[in-house]
Image (tube, rainbow, N blue to C red):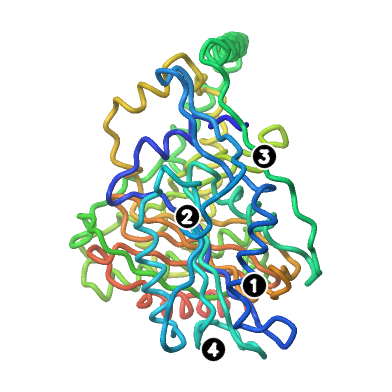
Amino acid sequence: MRRLNAADDRWICIESEQNTFQIGALLLFEADADHPSAAFEDAVRSHLEARLPATPLAVRLATAPGHFDTGVWLAVDQLDLERQVHRVDTDAPLDRAAVNELVSAQVLVPWDRTLAPFHASVLDTLDPDVADEPVSGRLVGLILQTHHSVADGVGFQSVIEDLTDPDPGPHSASIPWHREAAPAAPIWIASSAARFAAAQARHISARRDRGRAARELASLRARPGARRARTPVVAGMAASGLERGYERMVLPLSGLRTVGRALGGTVNDTLMTVVAGALRRLLEQRGVLDALGSEPLVALVPRSTRTDADGRYGNHLTMMLPQLATHVAEPRERFRLIHGAMRAEIARSELAQRLAGPEDRPFAARDRRRRTEAGTAAGNVSISNVPGPAEPRFLAGYRMVANYPVPNVVEGQFLNVTLRRYQDALHLGLMSDLEMMGEPATLVPLIEAEYEALCRVVW
């Protein structure tokens, strides 16, 4: 049994037709003589049957009595894999456009609460062009989606690690299934009340530190370079639609790392500068850059707060709002401004954590369901950087060749760019609101051009 924290519960409370909060990955694998494409579906089903009990996916949601507390995930002893894992039927190999269309449609399918919080689509007939890098064998794939209440981006990557192996195997050991029951209402309420009291006691004892944090935050806000930019309204990009567009690409980790070090920043600073430059070019193409003047676009950037005590799953993050310096044409200066904005936002988020009150309190889960909240409206775009494996991974013996993120687009934003490391590359997943932005494929050559322009600054 695993209790949802307040952030987990919030993703459930703010769901809407436009915000299903499905996150996931498009995983591509190479078939070979020992692991043929024709056997991929059966291999995936057998593999999931054996592995799912070791993941946070073989569960059902149980709500607390009267929403006195958040709900809990209870282990189940069986899953309806016929409904949760399906093969995508096709008469011909799916090409890149068809796979992208499939992914963008599935991200808007809401979680069926009668099922476990995940869905998998098996793609056993793919064109070679679906991959960004050539493979020697046939290409197969898996779209894996989970609800955001299960895990954040870092936690979802832990799920992928649970389901894959560092070598082709065989790995035949199965983990026993078992079924958990929710605690009786009096016991559940009593244990929750004790935890609420302990959280309140910790909050009271930290009063002095909160005073120091408030003074530090006031000082930070007074610094001109640390002032948070206002999220601008972009002409023609101010209303959310109900259609999504998906695209993906690969950037070299070594190149981004070299540029970041040369300019005194990080891989993440480099990636954000590249994306910001591409967005500037997009705004210029749309004829709306001049109307923004000196107002830069603002990004919503998750920052992990996970500690060892938090475990590998659930949501443990805070949200930052750095400006993207899209009003600046010169790449080096844009990098400097983004680097400074990120440092200020990291400091702000650390102070905000020290100031925050306990989210665990009686009936907080009930109160969240009574409030009307339309997603996370701050920021024009979301940009996320999720750690991933540096070594190859295998699923049922099939070698993984790509680990593309499948992010969501929150209401009020027009784009989500999420990247995940896999081996020596960064695999990017781009999801757009089609009504607000159009197909994200238009951004790919702009990102490539900005990456080359930033490299020329350094080299």
Instruction: Please name the amino acid that badge 1 sits on.
Output: Ala
Residue positioned 42% across, 40% down in the render: 11
Instruction: Please name the amino acid that badge 4 sits on.
Output: Pro
Decide if residue 379 is on the left or right side of residue 428: left
Which numbered dot is residue 183? none
Q: Position of residue 75 (x, y in %)?
A: 61, 38
Q: Earlier along the polypeptide chain: callout 3 or callout 1?
A: 3
Against 17, residue 165 (above or below) is: below
Please tell me whether mark 2 or mark 3 is closer to you in this view: 3
Q: Position of residue 195 (x, y in %)?
A: 59, 14
Instruction: Please name the amino acid that badge 2 sits on.
Output: Ile
Residue positioned 58% across, 28% down in the render: 181
Please tell me whether mark 1 or mark 4 is closer to you in this view: 4
Q: CA distance from mark 1 to mark 4?
A: 19 Å
Please tell me whether mark 4 or mark 3 is closer to you in this view: 3
- Viewer can see residue 207: no
Q: CA distance from mark 4 to mark 3?
A: 41 Å
Q: Position of residue 338 (x, y in %)?
A: 49, 55
Q: CA distance from mark 4 to mark 2?
A: 25 Å
Q: CA distance from mark 2 to mark 3?
A: 26 Å
Residue positioned 60% across, 17% down in the render: 209
Q: Secondary structure at mark 2?
A: strand
Query: Which of 387/90 is in front?
Result: 90
Against 2, residue 151 (above or below) is: below
Query: Which of 345/404 is in front?
Result: 404
Q: Earlier along the polypeptide chain: callout 1 or callout 4?
A: 4
Dividing the picture into quadrants, the one containing residue 386 is bottom right
- Viewer can see residue 382: yes
Q: How many residues crowd around disc 4 within 10 Å: few (fewer than 14), some, or many (20 or more)? A: some
**Pointers 2 and 3 in contact (C-beta within 8 Å):** no
Disc 1 designates what residue? Answer: 425
Which numbered dot is residue 23? 2
